Image: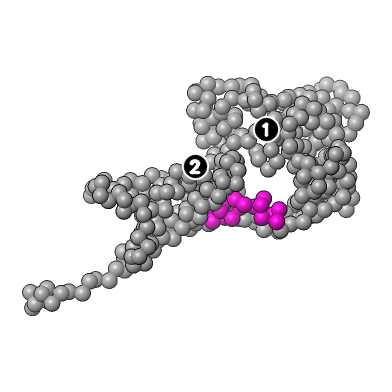
Amino acid sequence: MTFKKAIGKLHLWLGLGSGLVVFIVSLTGAIFTFQDEIRDLTEPGRKVEAQATAMLLPSRLQAVALAGHPDVPASTTWTTYFGPERAATVFFTDSGSQPIMVSLNPYTGQVLNEQNLRYHFFSIVQAIHMTLLLPEAVAKWVVGGSVVVFVVMLVTGLVLWWPKRKQERRQRFTIKWGARWRRINYDLHNVLGFYAASIAGLLALTGLFMIFPALLDSAMLVANGGREYPQEKAVAKVDTLQVVTAAAQLLPDVIYRTVRRRSPGAEMVLIGPTGAGKEPAQCWAYQRALHYYHRDEYAFHPVSGQLLQARFHTSKSNGAKLSDMNYDLHTGQIMGLGGKIVAFLASLISASLPVTGTVLWWGRRHKKAKPKTQKAAALSA
């Protein structure tokens, strides 16, 4: 068996084994790519008119959002400001363990929308994309393993695609639309697979970084040229033996004011749960709304509101910046709308590859024998 035949066998059986998972993960990824744009068009209360007045403090927004949920402590909520022309949101889990998101006008506190995210279309799409609705421990290996196989298939597919002779190269770059359907299917699998390989590989790798953090750690180490940055891994801790005085203001308001002062250019500010006094309260400030790359990170004492740790984007290592960039790379939004379009097309092509590949395999197994010519029939008589 030649090397290329061995690669072909490997490509075939890996594809048949992982094809269904790759199809589902790629298709749901394509659907999820434009979730913000689609939700802006279809959901009420996503945008507001910018005003010259200051936005309300998080404690005010939390109080309004929880008015209909008196059993939910404000300290368990996630509060997010998305910029001057977008609604703020308060997210929490209610007494029935349902994930609720309340959208409010950040200037007036008016409730614009309340959603149960468990039944939200894009929440379901995201859950299928990430776990196939399987238990997390199982999904990690089913989805992660299939994505690893997909990366291997991209490499083996390029080996099989590579033309031996120069005159074949033009043919390998184009789809022969006027041919029979079997040839069109062959070209769709090979030509589109070639064009999408680099972007599909990037999407797959960034997805693997989310599933297997050890892979991301390795990529960060490479980005840092092998250098370690222990200070970036340092975790803020609360000294529970220290006697502290509670902040004069409500803790979320202290956090919000401090972050606005220290990261004045941030459009999006996310304040995490303030907790029960044992773990630091966290806050993240992002330069652009709905983009997660450029961010400053803060940790506060959960009682006094004292700033325990601040990590600014400008002072981060290349590896840390790569880690922050991972989600935006995975969704294509690192390059704005154009990047999303490219990621969408690459995901659609990735979803098509198991289909066209299976049709190829099925066609070869059930290929009809060519009718014998009269001369061949005469010779065999």
| CB contact under 8 Å: marks 1 and 2 | no
The stretch in magenta equals 25-41
| Residue 36 within the segment the image draws in magenta | yes
Residue depicted at 67% across the width and 50% down the height: 36
The residue labelled by disc 2 is 202
Q: Which mark is residue 295?
A: 1
Task: Choose top left, top right, bottom left or bottom right for residue 77.
Answer: top right
Q: Which mark is residue 196?
A: none
- Residue 146 visible: yes
Residue depicted at 30% across the width and 49% down the height: 169
* Residue nearest the observer in this picture, 38 or 58: 38
- Residue 300 visible: no
Q: Amino acid at mark 1?
A: Arg
| Residue 279 within the segment the image draws in magenta | no
* Residue nearest the observer in this picture, 240 or 337: 337
Residue depicted at 55% across the width and 50% down the height: 341
Q: Secondary structure at mark 2?
A: helix
Q: Is residue 363 left or right of residue 269?
A: left
Quadrant where the C terminus is found in the figure:
bottom left
Residue depicted at 90% across the width and 31% down the height: 249
Q: Is residue 262 above or below residue 51?
A: above
Where does the image place residue 22, in percent across and percent down from the top left? Answer: 49, 53
